[in-house]
Amino acid sequence: MAYKETYPSKLLEDAVDAISSLPGVGRRSALRLALHLLKQPAENVHHFTTAIDRLRDEVRYCRVCRMISDEDTCSICSDRSRDRKTICVVENVRDVMSIENTGQYHGVYHVLGGIISPINGVGPSDLTIAELVERIKTADAENTEVILALSGDVEGETTSFYIYRQIAQYGVKVSALARGLGFGDDLEYADELTLGRSIANRQIFKP
Amino acid sequence: MAYKETYPSKLLEDAVDAISSLPGVGRRSALRLALHLLKQPAENVHHFTTAIDRLRDEVRYCRVCRMISDEDTCSICSDRSRDRKTICVVENVRDVMSIENTGQYHGVYHVLGGIISPINGVGPSDLTIAELVERIKTADAENTEVILALSGDVEGETTSFYIYRQIAQYGVKVSALARGLGFGDDLEYADELTLGRSIANRQIFKP
């Protein structure tokens, strides 16, 4: 039940084109959203578009960790209570937000801005790996721990390995996220790879 | 698994607020979309916001049928081959697009711009009913048919009845969409109301 590409107005069609360029938004949803915006007061729509324009035009990144920030240095890097000897390397901004939401981490971050992915044309030089190396070289590397918190797929593993080779020479401790069954997960529904590794990496039972 | 409302940047938070104001877009999706836009070239983002601003600021409505249009009169109303004695009354722009897509209708339209809904504070004066009445009064009403193509819920029925009372006095023929089982529908899964009406409104079998 696809809409044929006939729109009563070029303005409407242009807006649908624009909105449907967003990931996960089809043309039918885009039409619904465009007609919704059309019904709103003009000032609400301008507020909507201005917020997006400002985000794109005025966004800044922390000079230390490359996290999105409104300041030269982000709130985490400038927080004196955070442990600056522990650097958690993540792919993107959302990963930082997810880890912050756990409330379990008190170190600092390094945001790569992506993951090494030859198929998507993303190489090491497109990421902030050089900045990470620089950061470690100028720090007290011997007493620094780098946590590689990248995804567990091939691209994540490749990126972790690449970074490890770049930084291990400076004597930092390098760790990675624990992998295994999720808490509360049922063995029956676990994939074989996860289950196999969970057995291999079994830990002392601490009741 | 809700994100707590802590954003690393006010600009990002404002953009997420704006995007999540769209119907059906939660804060998590809004964050994903905001970060997607952040990765796009600035000119693409400006193209996106400009298309939306222009739609809202420059949109026009056909002076005859109130359909969205780039011209003073829409392409349907100005098409000499359309039957102007048949006026199909619909709730919104999408309904026109849906009916046009069937390729089965060759009359013209009248777009109400909504439906009478006391619960949403929408009364007859918020819709283009007065314009419809004016249109019928100034036409050859005796030879005009008005098709009420509104939804079959209480609000649609109420609106149809209200319009009927406003226009019947001018001698127009008033019809409504056929209701019954959808083509290909299975009796077993039809709701009782639809099935009941399908029996009551049964038609001569024309093989």
Image: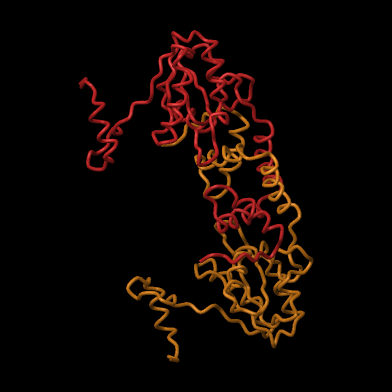
Chain colours: A orange, B red
Residue B86 position by quadrant: top left
> Which quarter shows the N terminus of chain A?
top left
Residue A189 position by quadrant: bottom left
Instruction: Report the residue that reaches farthest toward the right.
Output: A72
Residue at image x 68%, y 84%? A144
Q: Which of A195/A136 is in front?
A: A195
> Which quarter shows the C terminus of chain A?
bottom left
Residue at image x 44%, y 75%? A182
Q: Residue B24 in the image: x percent, y percent?
A: 52, 49
Q: Which of B60/A105 is in front?
A: B60
Q: Tell me: A144 left or right of B206.
A: right
Q: Which of B15/A130 is in front?
A: B15
Q: Residue A175 in the image: x percent, y percent?
A: 58, 81
Q: How many marks?
A: 0
Q: Residue B179 in the image: x percent, y percent?
A: 33, 29
Q: Residue B192 in the image: x percent, y percent?
A: 26, 40
Q: Relative to B151, say whether A126 is above or below.
A: below
Residue at image x 57%, y 24%? B66
Q: Tell me: B179 left or right of A98.
A: left
Q: Which of A71/B200 is in front?
A: B200
Q: Tell me: A193 left or right of B34.
A: left
Q: Relative to A123, say whether B153 is above or below.
A: above
Q: Relative to B186, say whether B16 is above or below.
A: below
Residue at image x 69%, y 34%? B57
Residue B143 position by quadrant: top left
